Image: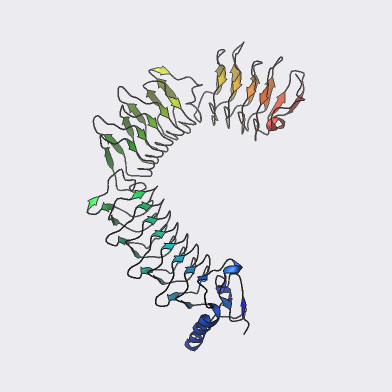
Amino acid sequence: MKKRKIAGAISACALGVLSVPPCAEAMVQFQQDLSDLACPRGVVAIDGRCEDTVVLQEIVERDTPYTLRSTVVPARVEVLGEYCFFECSFLSHVVFEANSQLTRIEEDALAQSGLQSFHIPAGVQMLGRKCLARCLSLASVTFEPGSQMMWMGASAFSGSSLQCMCIPAGVQELGAYCFFECPSLTVVTFEEGSQLRFVGDEAFAGSAMESIRFLRKVDARELVFLRSCIMEIFLNNQPVDVLSGLYGGTDILRSVTIPRDTLKIRGSCFKCCKSLDSVLFEANSQLVRIGAGAFAWSRLRCVSLPASVQVLEDECFAFCSLLTSVTFEAGSQLKVVEDGAFVAAPMKRIDFPHVVSAAISVFAGSRIKKIFFANRLASLFSGFYAGTSVPQVVVVPQDVITIGPYCFRGCKSLDIVFFEENSQLETIEEGAFYGSGVQSITLPPNVTVLREECFAWCQSLTLVTFQAGFQLRVIERSVFERSIRARVLLPNGGMFPATQLNRGWMRDLPP
């Protein structure tokens, strides 16, 4: 019988690399061969990726018609390495010898195998990324009493057919997507004395659980129960705090009241809460910040923000498809509205109590028509109109010196930009007209700087005219990136594709 070390010996077993006849006598002999030949004295790892760590040898010819259906892992093995049983689709059972020294099961070690059940030795401390992912027949995973398990990696059981799980007390972290899309998973419990501290993004997304009881407060990341059947989340015997972050992506909440002493609503706290249509704040609220995506994709209809709120973070009310009214209490301290805070909201008007700082595309894709600061209509150059339906024609006043970053970004309705006579404009900042619908523009002679991507992705832009006596000194890279139809017209009648300027200033550009 040919005996030689091969890279990926076990992971290729479905193709016959490590194969066994189905009869009982052959299985006994196979296990003897595995013990005697495939795991030499001193070997403490089984791995299927790197040749210098592969320890199982080919014990039958590659073209044998049989495939590996079960195996026994020797007690002295400490690691199941990356991909060691990957895609072993006929492998239904992996058994560990008594007193197993196994401490780790690494990335994709048993992923997409045919396992039906799996019993994890007590000494295993970590499960690597996707180690048991997409095991479509895997209904049961159990742990030996006294389990030392501390960490379950990202997507460890994702896409499997698990029905229930009792998580050992020592587990401190469930990685992102740990039980993602386990549609048969109906029960998850925690051993008494649970040390769980962290639950990653979408850890139980798509599961069939209706109820779960945590034994201690956990740090929950984004959308832990998205698209699941969860209807009850408990901390010990009480409903978990509404600000815990665990309700994001669920249909549990209809209305929520924010306690007076709350300083910040954490990011994604109520994101994708499709049943949430009302948020209230206790009197004399001390709330300072509303975190990124906090209410995004919820069904809020109106919001009255406390006077104490100073910052609205990125996309905090984005894609709230029913949000038509946002108001501010008297004495509002609002200072900053960050990127996309009200993206795609249907409201047509908002009255800020005073001038505030705007980031990129605050109202992009929304129906906003009028933005007021202290009862005065906001200038088109305030930066708040990026991505909105601005007028088809924009006239730049004579005293405007700078068109700010991303000022008209994504304004598809914008066709023409005019400049008043004797314009003092000097700089067009980064991304100012990025992705807008502008068709032509004649730059005033005082313009000296065109910043990066200021006319990028303007696919309707056909003509950029430089007036006589133009004073351009700086043209940064990618100014006309992807504006492939645009041509530059010089005062002497010369014309060339605008994309030639994407590398920056051209020294031979005629005056």
- Tell me which corner region of the image, top left, top right, bottom left or bottom right, holds residue 165: bottom left
Nearer to us in this view, 241 or 124: 124
Nearer to us in this view, 223 or 408: 223
Residue 326 vertical position relative to residue 111 in the rendered view, above or below: above
Nearer to us in this view, 100 or 240: 100
Judge left or right: residue 79 versus residue 205: right
How many marks are shown on the rendered structure? 0
- Tell me which corner region of the image, top left, top right, bottom left or bottom right, holds residue 451: top right
Which residue sits furthest front? 42
Residue 82 vertical position relative to residue 452 in the rendered view, above or below: below
Residue 155, image x and y in percent?
A: 45, 58
Please say which color scheme the image uses.
rainbow
Residue 52 vertical position relative to residue 434 in the rendered view, above or below: below
Which residue sits furthest left? 237
The residue sitting at 34% across, 32% down in the picture is 288
Residue 122, image x and y in percent?
A: 37, 69
Which residue sits furthest bottom? 25
Judge left or right: residue 67 versus residue 229: right
Residue 511, image x and y in percent?
A: 75, 18
Q: Quadrant of the N terminus?
A: bottom right
Residue 405, image x and y in percent?
A: 54, 27
- Tell me which corner region of the image, top left, top right, bottom left or bottom right, holds residue 37: bottom right
The residue sitting at 77% across, 25% down in the picture is 508
